[in-house]
Image: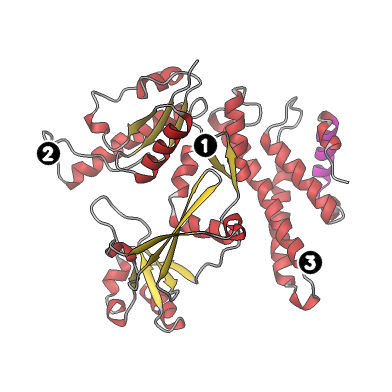
Amino acid sequence: MQKHYFFVSWDEDLHTAAAKKRIEEKLGIEVHLVSTNTLTFRDGLTFYDSENVESQLLPQCKSGDVVWARRIRPFQKSRSEIPRGAEEDAFVHNAFNHAFMGALSACQSRNVVNDIWLQQKADIKILQLNAAAREGFKIPDTIVSNAPRSVREFFARHHGKVIAKAISGTRYNTYVTVALSDDILEDDAGIIACPAIYQEMVEGNRHLRVNFFGDNAYAFEIESDIVDWRRKLTRNIRHVDLSPSLISGLGRIKTIGDALTLFDSRSIVDFLDVADGRHTLIPAAGQDRYVVLTQQALADGIMDAALLQLYEVRAPREAKRHDDCIAYQQRKIDRALKAFSERPPGQGATQPMIGEIALASALGYLSLRFEGRWRADHSKLVTWLEDFARRFSAYEATMPY
């Protein structure tokens, strides 16, 4: 049976249009765009049966088809025959988008290949900064604030070399990045009105924009003397080649098949579990799904903290080590182990879920790299791991030597 592909986004999203064009050219198939900002122009939005929600939202969608959700909560376009003011506009927008999000989440486990809630998180600029920092990129000194005193202290600390950018925009206006000045900082009301991102200014007139399509990176250099080059798009723009090391450092990118690019092992595991259809690793829906995903995240946190400890311990010279950093990461590990001791995952289960696998992997890593010191204070987890290894022989078979 031929597969069909659906992209869920707003109708003027350039990224979706580019991905649609590339997949159609590469695979020779048609990609259907489900426009999320024109829901008011449909004959109706009705769903009542979660088992058949795909056929109600996406009439052509059948089991086995692929849905990629990108921009799923844009503002709704207005119908000229139904005039409305700002208050009604916001009400209509929220009602349509909450209804659509609820319906889309109902078919999340069957057709939608990306987690729609993680997709929402990916649009948050503060999380973007944190993700870049985790991947080793140098982030300019940054605060998010609407407190005049904090903003002025930050401005003074950087000798007036500070920019301000909006945390998010609206459909009415694009808020460009500006250089802060003493005049702007005199306006307490303007600062208090809403929080903004304040960053140390990075001097220069060359801006790099990088896009990934599968394993291929395309970079463009924009030459502009103004802080935000978007104010005037008639700038010198040219294609540039990036070094392999820089491309590698732009993120942990894994490609699944020819059409989809997934980021991070958690997304890949979720994709494979959904593709398999049996949901043996992650429950399809309900509270159990989020319990398992929380366990996975907590165990991943143990691994992240342990790795940071190891980097410090293995510093080439003792003078380069930061004992306070090692202790800080150990406190995070201890808190996570305490939480797992109080409520260990999946006891007695015949099939391990991803939370159990992640915890067993983390405990195994702590035993390998830190001489098993965790065992002295967490006897319940020692018993849990022994039981896990007994129930699932693959654990012992894949232990590192």
Amino acid type of disc 2? Pro
Q: Nearer the viewer, mark 3 or mark 1?
A: 1
| Residue 169 quadrant | bottom left
| Residue 288 quadrant | top right
Q: Which mark is residue 83?
A: 2
Separation (CA) of disc 3 from disc 2: 65 Å
Q: Nearer the viewer, mark 1 or mark 2?
A: 1
Dot 3 alpha-carbon crowd within 10 angstroms: few under 14, some 14 to 19, many 20 or more: some
Q: How is the image coloured?
A: secondary structure
* Range of magenta residues: 377-390
Please tell me which of labels 1 and 2 falls first in the chain: 2
Q: Is residue 266 left or right of residue 29?
A: right
Q: From the viewer's side, name the closer residue of 237 and 122.
A: 237
Q: Position of residue 91 (x, y in %)?
A: 24, 40
Residue 206, placed above or below residue 349: below
**Kind of element beneath mark 2:** loop
